[in-house]
Image: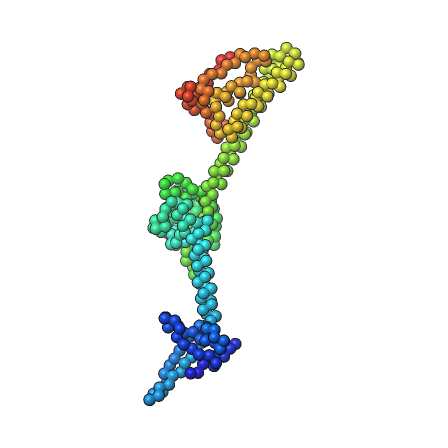
Amino acid sequence: MPFSASADRLYTSRSVRRVTPEGHSNGIDTDGSRFPVELAISPIGSGDRPRFTAYLRDITLRKQAEAAQRESEQRLRSTYEHAFTSIAEVDAGGRFLRVNEQLSIITGYSRDELLQMTFIDITHPDDLRMDLDQFRRQMAGEIEAYTLEKRYVHRDGHSIWIELSASRVDDVNGRPLYGIRVARDITGRKRAEEHQRLLINELNHRVKNTLTTVQSIVFQTLRNAPTPEDAQTALASRLIALSKAHDVLTRESWEAASLHQIVAEAMEPFRAYGENRIKVWGASGSPATLNGAGDCHGAPGTSDERGEVWISL
């Protein structure tokens, strides 16, 4: 049986046999090692002694390339499915062609449900235009990629903020085939930013109120104190009392505190030195909450369902 030769080794000293149930052939080298081969046998001549021509080709490199490709595809598939970001492929109309598990987690829709939808269906109406305009330009070949922040609408109705990165895959002629949309959930970051904004507004409001209160304390103290020494003592004690009102909210992370306690400590600086002419009573257990403007609102308490506090001067 004749054998062909490759550029780097000859096969004249090797034998070939069938070794797999699928009919694939392996060559056996002189050292006993096996290597994959492609074998072609053709009959020649006729008569009582038929003859055949066999052609043998070493396909080790091809098999290695195929194995490497399968490994790469498996790794890519695993990355696609288990990524911490959502990944989706969409057609030119925005319909989902393929989605990973993370998109289901973010939106609450199953994979099968998403494959019957478009990204338009899960985008918040107020954010749709800015995304859709850029997507159409992308599919028209005007831009290759874009990023933006927008909201998805969860299956149960609440909004999820995402950071979207959209790209495009083209065919050999440069025509768009499909879009790739990678998104990560940034709802937590958005809530933190909103909380920070509220804290800044509250700080601004609180500083203005504090300066107004200090102005009133100084005016009242200087007007009523008989001597400069009495004014100094009274002013110091009242400013310390004022700081206690801030301590109440600070202890509660500036979110809620006893309405009775806030009012009592806030009124402390306005008491005349050495007197106790201001009395506070009412819902001692009422929690007070702060809105974005820094306003204080009382909630119903155990001792007074209206959550009110009375001050007697």
Q: Position of residue 244 (x, y in %)?
A: 56, 23
Q: Visible in this render: residue 265?
A: yes
> Looking at the image, which residue sits at the far bottom?
47
Q: Is residue 125 left or right of residue 227?
A: left
Is 35 in front, or is 138? 35
Q: Position of residue 173 (x, y in %)?
A: 44, 62
> Looking at the image, which residue sits at the far front?
32
Residue visible at 48% across and 27% down in the picture: 256
- Colour scheme shown: rainbow
Instruction: Using the rendered view, name the quadrant where residue 54 is placed.
Output: bottom left
Total numbered badges shown on the rendered structure? 0
Residue visible at 60% across and 12% down in the picture: 224
Q: Visible in this render: residue 138?
A: no
Is residue 198 depicted above or below 233 in this figure? below
Q: Position of residue 195 (x, y in %)?
A: 49, 35
Residue visible at 49% across and 77% down in the picture: 30
Q: Position of residue 120 (x, y in %)?
A: 38, 47
> Looking at the image, which residue sits at the far left?
48
Q: Quadrant of the N terminus?
A: bottom left
Q: Is residue 104 left or right of residue 228?
A: left
Instruction: Using the rendered view, name the quadrant where residue 171 is placed.
Output: bottom left
Residue visible at 39% across and 47% down in the picture: 104
